[in-house]
Image (spheres, helix red, strand yellow):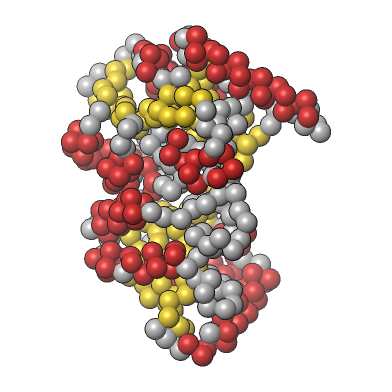
Amino acid sequence: MTQGTTIRRIADLDELEAVGPLWKELHDGCEYSHVLMDHRWVLAWWRHFGAGKAQHTLVLSTGSTPVGIVPLAITKGLEAYPFRDAYVSCPDDYRHLPSLRWQRVVPVRRLTFPINIISGNARGQFIFPQPERSLYAALAGYAQTTSGSWDVATLPGLRSWTHEDAMLGATIDSVGLSLGTRRSMRDMLYADLPPTWPEFLKSRSRSFRENLRRDVKKIEQDFAHLGPMKVSNFRGPDVVANLNRLFALEEQSWKVSDEKERRLHLALDDRARSFFREAATRFSADDDANLLILSFGDTDAAGLFNLERGGTSLGLTLYRSEKLGKPVTAAPLFQNLVESCISRGMKRIDFNGYTRNYAKWAKDHHTYTRTIFFNSRPYSQMLRAVDNSAVALSRLVSPRGNAPVEQARTPS
């Protein structure tokens, strides 16, 4: 820890629940209101995915004034080290990647954020209203003092455009930790929202407007035999009451089907469904959740679940039925999402991934980076040597001789 900055660790769910008002106050003061850094989301994550993990939620203070929160977790398990997929955040994630599932032979204690593939948070993990270098130095100091409990630290979601990764990296060596050489970046899409839907359309290309009209007309024609098209927009308690319709669509999607060959398997289980139910309950209690269902007559065709905070809406999960005989475009859902967000005064939509479909609606993207570092203990240094050797080997076989850059993009 740096002089003048103190750190208090929160280690259990009761303490984490109690810090909610302070968390909200600090989060409201941040420039970027990343939805999945909300206290309600992180608390639900710990309640459903925290088994076997050590909680290190840190409250940073200057004197008696809280100035930041950093939610951390230490996971333990076998990993396919150093061949670590860009999607993997904890050992539990390997079940979604069959290609690596049977290569998990190396025991690793990993210091990271409370995230996994299902929760999918890749944006801004530090709640710092005033992101000064002293706070990152204090975090590095804490990592050093607890180095006996972890082997590798992996911190994704750092804001490269604000030099957050550079500020953290500059403090690592000074406390006796060692930066890794592996680079990792992840692009996340967003769209700024104007005051009206016509203004949004005007800001898009002629091709976008024509394709939107064509896609909406085509889907109405393709499924007219099922009944009239309708987009139902649920808020408040109706979100939770209709969430099973979203889960039913998930069961009819490519994500649980074996018909398509894919690297990433994203099927939900009972624990994941319970997690989404709790998150939906907590957010909808404050009218910060929205569920859209696209249907034809009595047949549901697609669903979109999104969460809101501080003027930002996050399109969280999208499921489309593969059982209707023809492809289901999400155009009517996204049009309804944008129109409803504008009507509620939202300023921005974040997309939880990077797909061709999301890219049609997005304005731009931010690039988030992942910082990896090691401690001075022999096992950690051995892991560092192995990882750096793997990176060096990749450099040799890279056509341009550059260090490999891992990128994770959600399948369309």
Quadrant into which the C terminus falls: bottom right
Residue 166 occupies quadrant: top right
Residue 130 occupies quadrant: top left
Res. 36 in view? yes
- Outermost residue, right direction? 399
From the viewer's perspective, tell me whether residue 201 is left or right of residue 36: right
Quadrant into which the N terminus falls: top left
Residue that appears at 43% across and 29% down: 77
From the viewer's perspective, tell me whether residue 386 is left or right of residue 165: right
Q: Nearer the viewer, residue 62 or 171?
A: 171
Q: Nearer the viewer, residue 236 or 403?
A: 403
Q: Nearer the viewer, residue 80 or 113?
A: 80
Task: Give the tally of numbered discs.
Answer: 0
Q: Position of residue 128 (x, y in %)?
A: 38, 32
Q: Position of residue 197 (x, y in %)?
A: 49, 70
Q: Position of residue 288 (x, y in %)?
A: 31, 58
- Above or below: residue 134 compared with residue 120: above
From the viewer's perspective, tell me whether residue 342 is left or right of residue 324: left
- Above or below: residue 290 compared with residue 215: above
Residue that appears at 32% across and 32% down: 52
Q: Position of residue 151 (x, y in %)?
A: 45, 19
Residue 218 occupies quadrant: bottom right
Residue that appears at 41% across and 33% down: 113
Res. 26 in view? no
